[in-house]
Amino acid sequence: MIMKSRTAYLADVAIIGGGIAGIVTALELLDKNLTVAVLDRDGPDKFGGQAITAFGGMALVGTPLQKLTGIQDSPELAFADWCDTAEFTENDELPRQWAEMYCHRNLGDVYRWIRKRGVHFLPSVLWPERGAYRPGNSVPRYHIMWGTGYYLMNQLIEELRGHPRAGKASLYFWHRVTSIDRSRGVIAGCSGLDIASGKEFTVKAGVVVVASGGIGGNVKRVKRIWPPELGRAPAELLIGSHPFCDGSSYDMAARAGGTVTNISSMWNYPEGVPHPSPQYPMQGLRVLAPKSALWMDYTGRRIGPEPLIGYFDTPHVAKIICNMKKQHTWHIMNWKIAVKELALSGAEHNEMIRDRKIFGLAKTVLRGNGPLVERMIRESEDFIAADSLPELVEKMNALAGNRDVSLAAMERDIRRYDDQIERGVAFHNDDQLRRIAHARNWKGDKMRTCKFQKIIDARAMPLIAIRYRMLTRKSLGGIQTDLQSRAVDKKGNPVTGLYAVGEAAGFGGGGINGKSSLEGTFISCCILTGRIAGRSIAGESNP
């Protein structure tokens, strides 16, 4: 692998961004004997981008693991679910085509491609985004990589560095691209600033691939384009992306002749908490909301009349919360619920899976994740523990800096819920209890879902409250591309020499997910778009 530091570079292809989509594209190009310049805005220790810190779950269709566990899935069923969730419009022809292609090709182009690189999946397929009051995943599709995104990215980086043609790939770190260059109307490369030296640089290349993410790290821009149908843009947004994902790639592509579509479509999470040890301002973590916890508004009243339940329909929950007077919420549970059901997204807080420690994972599944809960209570002020409800409410109000939370209201709503559980399953008439029963019918979710656990329970103390805020995550829109990952202009014609992959391309077509996602469609779409771009650039007309 060649490491250079010059002001002028030359390559067949310039790739803007060293995340998973950029690396996959580079691997495909090396296979075709092309020279590649990968320009990354971050340092070499962050090579791999957000995927290296990601949990790495993938929505996959028709896999051997699905068949082994009795899941009857097909590309046709997956595409029907996808369209129901995406709510494509008549202007979304390319995103719809990308979605159909993904449903038919993910098994070969993603799943088998990953497996050839030594990446395995946990034996349990999970079932997120199955839909609350609209269709979602009809069957479980969420495959968890053994090793998380961390292991996958290390495998890919090792493959890149050890590639037989590694000498044809040059990696330039701390290089911020500010312009996609054209000469006589044709893509001629890109240019920008070498942050380390302070010098400007230029890359002469006949092809430029944009692989530099979306807008989730640019809070001001996210608020500015917030779709009105989701309610008010939250006054306080945590960042679940990266500050370098600021939307600048969209602007560069548009100036070079490309088109950016579905820009206001975003995948944000309502269960965000500030990172206890942030690497940048407003960095957040996503809590995988326990199904057995009660979701309360800022006053401590249970949100309803339909209760909010995590894991079923994320955009629905986000919309409800963003239409509230105050947009921070509370999740109320006890120790027993938290230990069995609570998890945090990402590789950092799933060490047993990330480090592939089979016995440690088995222990966590059987005994619960007490160390994680203890750690968050100790390190995060937004995790509150108390031995009684009055004490919990007092601490909640102290954290919020007001007296908004009503002890009487919270006690009433918890008692109503607990009383139904006390009366027995035959008398359950609460939608949350029905959904818990539904979740427990699938063995993949049963292992981390309590069996109708009351909140006030002397055998399950202490009580725990978590304060949530909205968290940015992924941009669902982006640079519009045809089915060969070529950027297209406003008339739908390819911009010769300009490609986009991964989140920069809206994960395919400028918005493959439409307005919502089936979850697990991000890393896998980065792989698919990168592979297609590489083969298309190399001259394969139907990659």
Image (cartoon, rainbow, N blue to C red):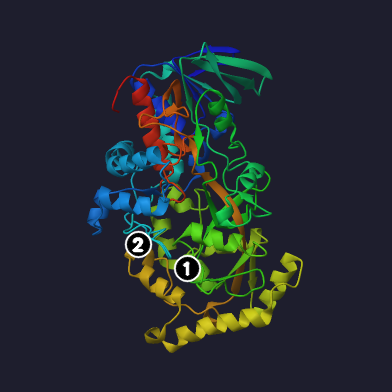
Q: Position of residue 432 (x, y in %)?
A: 46, 73
Between the residue at mark 2 and the residue at mark 1, the CA separation in whole angstroms equals 14 Å
Task: Tell me if I can see residue 118 in this picture.
Answer: no
Q: In which image quadrant can residue 178 be found?
A: top right
Q: Residue at left 52%, top 53%?
A: 349
Question: Please, which residue is most extreme toward the bottom here?
Answer: 423
The location of residue 139, given as percent across then percent down, is: 31, 58
Q: Please determine whether, in this image, residue 265 is positioned above or below residue 338.
A: above
* Residue at image coords 66%, 83%: 408
| Residue 31 place in picture, x, y as percent | 34, 22
Q: Secondary structure at mark 1?
A: loop
The answer to which of 94 and 163 lies nearer the viewer is: 94
**Residue holding disc 2:** 444
Q: Is residue 263 above or below residue 160?
A: below
- Quarter of the view holding residue 441: bottom left
The residue pinned by badge 1 equals 291
Q: Secondary structure at mark 2?
A: helix
Could you classify mark 2 by the number of other residues whose Cα lies within 10 Å: few (under 14), some (14-19), or many (20 or more)? Answer: some
Residue 413 % position (x, y)? 58, 80
The amino acid marked with disc number 2 is Gly
